[in-house]
Image: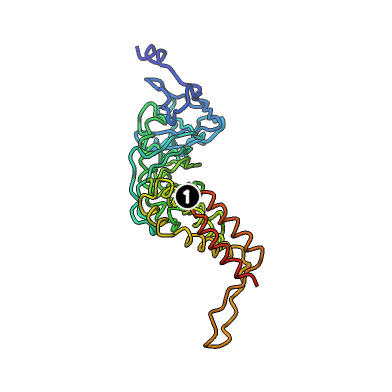
Amino acid sequence: MALMDFIKKQFIDIIQWTESEDGTLAWRFPMSDMEIQNGASLTVRESQVAMFVNEGKVADVFGPGTYKLTTQTLPVLTYLKNWDKLFESPFKSDVYFFSTRQQVDQKWGTPQPITIRDKDFGAVRLRAFGNYSFRVSDAKLFHTEISGTREEYGVEDLDGQLRGLVLQNISNAIASSGVPFLDLAANQIQFAAALATQLVPEFAKIGIKLENITVQNVSLPEELQKVLDQRIGMGMVGNDMGKFMQYQTAQAIPKFAEGAGNGGGGIAGDAMGLGAGVALGQVLAQNLSQGLGQGQPAPAAASAQSQPSVAVVTPNEVMATLEKLGELKSKGILTQEEFDAKKADLLKKLV
């Protein structure tokens, strides 16, 4: 009877895993009541790791290659089984395979706006999304911390945990980077780098290596988006204060024109009614002069009794300013009388 039981036993001669579908991170070799023969073959393919577990304890771990299972290739299992005294064949041991290839295009995003603290704007609410890729880097740690004794463990089982880590560390990433939030929002690569720095050690705690993370979009509240747009506009004119003043004036002109075009209603209309068009022309002329860098300092007073000096301007400045004033007149911002008065004033400054 014992002989018949021995004949009915099934023995494993080849241990291997061919991934049948994408997204599997850990897979337990089906043992049933089968036992492993002494000298059986273990095949571990590229992008795989195999691990023997004896009575709940991790024993030997194998990288890519083909192995003949003996006391020499299973030193830890041999120690646990006391095979140095007598090798038992066949034997039983759980065998797990892990996929170490890169799991790409994993999505992350903020389901609800999250609040972060910024040194420039205080509390800021934002939405963001992107993708990331990872791989199993420490099979033993991943087995003990995450996958355990399950027959199969996939990417979808880990998805919620990794998304949570990303969202949890966004605020910490921005705070630790020391970079103003607007700079991060305008440079998504820098944002992603700050986030990766924060996440790499968190992923490593569960045997995962973060290979890459991207920030594909950052959505800001409307009022903060306007500030960002202005910051970008300032960047276009550089550090030249004259050009910056020109930029600000150009931004203000359409608002005055809109107020005047609506029948003079509101602040813009009242200002135009009080002759603000002339003042605007003067500011424009001054800004143009400063931006071009061609203005000359007014001559010093000859004596305490002398009249205030008249600023000297060049013909080119006069022509450029008159052209701008002409545009304001054609748009209805300046009246003909205001234009003529400003024109006469400019011509008096020619020396």
- Percent of width and height locating residue 141: 40, 41
Q: Nearer the viewer, residue 304 or 100?
A: 304
Q: Nearer the viewer, residue 56 or 168?
A: 168
Q: Nearer the viewer, residue 339 or 318?
A: 339
At 57% from the left and 75% from the top, the residue drawn is 310
From the viewer's perspective, is residue 41 above or below residue 310? above
- Percent of width and height locating residue 247: 52, 56
Disc 1 marks a residue whose amino acid type is Pro
From the viewer's perspective, is residue 72 above or below residue 30? below
> Residue 338, can we see it?
yes
**Placement of the C terminus among the 4 image quadrants:** bottom right
> What sort of colour scheme is used for the picture?
rainbow
- Disc 1 element: helix
- Percent of width and height locating residue 271: 40, 57
- Percent of width and height locating residue 156: 39, 30
**Placement of the N terminus among the 4 image quadrants:** top left
Q: Residue furthest front?
A: 337
At 56% from the left and 58% from the top, the residue drawn is 238
Q: Is residue 118 left or right of residue 294?
A: left
At 39% from the left and 50% from the top, the residue drawn is 264
> Residue 85, can we see it?
no
At 58% from the left and 73% from the top, the residue drawn is 311
Disc 1: CA contacts within 10 A as few (<14), some (14-19) or many (>=20): few
Q: In this figure, which residue is indicated by the disc labeled 1?
A: 254
Q: Is residue 206 left or right of residue 342?
A: left
Count of all numbered marks drawn on residues in the image: 1
